[in-house]
Amino acid sequence: MPSSKFTAEEKLEIIKGLSETDLTKAVYLKLHNVGPKAFRRWQKFYAQDGLEGL
């Protein structure tokens, strides 16, 4: 698996941050330089395995 430019903790901050912002998902992800597919994958892995999944 290729290494990520984000740590697991950074991914979790981005996942949780989406629910705390008034920005649209598209704008929020663009500001964090995260693609929508990657974000969905992070959400899935976090839901399945918690922080260790990221």
Image (cartoon, rainbow, N blue to C red):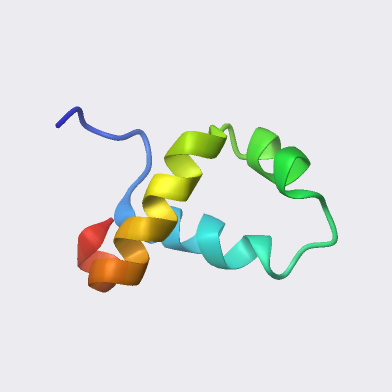
Nearer to me, 10 or 36: 36
Residue 16, position in %: x, y? 56, 67
Outermost residue, top direction?
2
Outermost residue, left direction?
1
Compared across the picture, whether 49 is left or right of 10 comes to left
Residue 21, position in %: x, y? 77, 63
Residue 34, position in %: x, y? 54, 35
Outermost residue, right direction?
22
- Is residue 34 visible in the rendered image? The answer is no
Q: Where's the N terminus, which quadrant?
A: top left
- Is residue 9 visible in the rendered image? The answer is yes
Q: Where's the C terminus, which quadrant?
A: bottom left
Q: Against 19, is 7 above or below?
A: above
Nearer to me, 3 or 47: 47
Residue drawn at point x = 69 percent, y = 37 percent: 31
Asked where in the image residue 48 lies, by quadrant, the reply is bottom left
Residue drawn at point x = 38 percent, y = 47 percent: 41
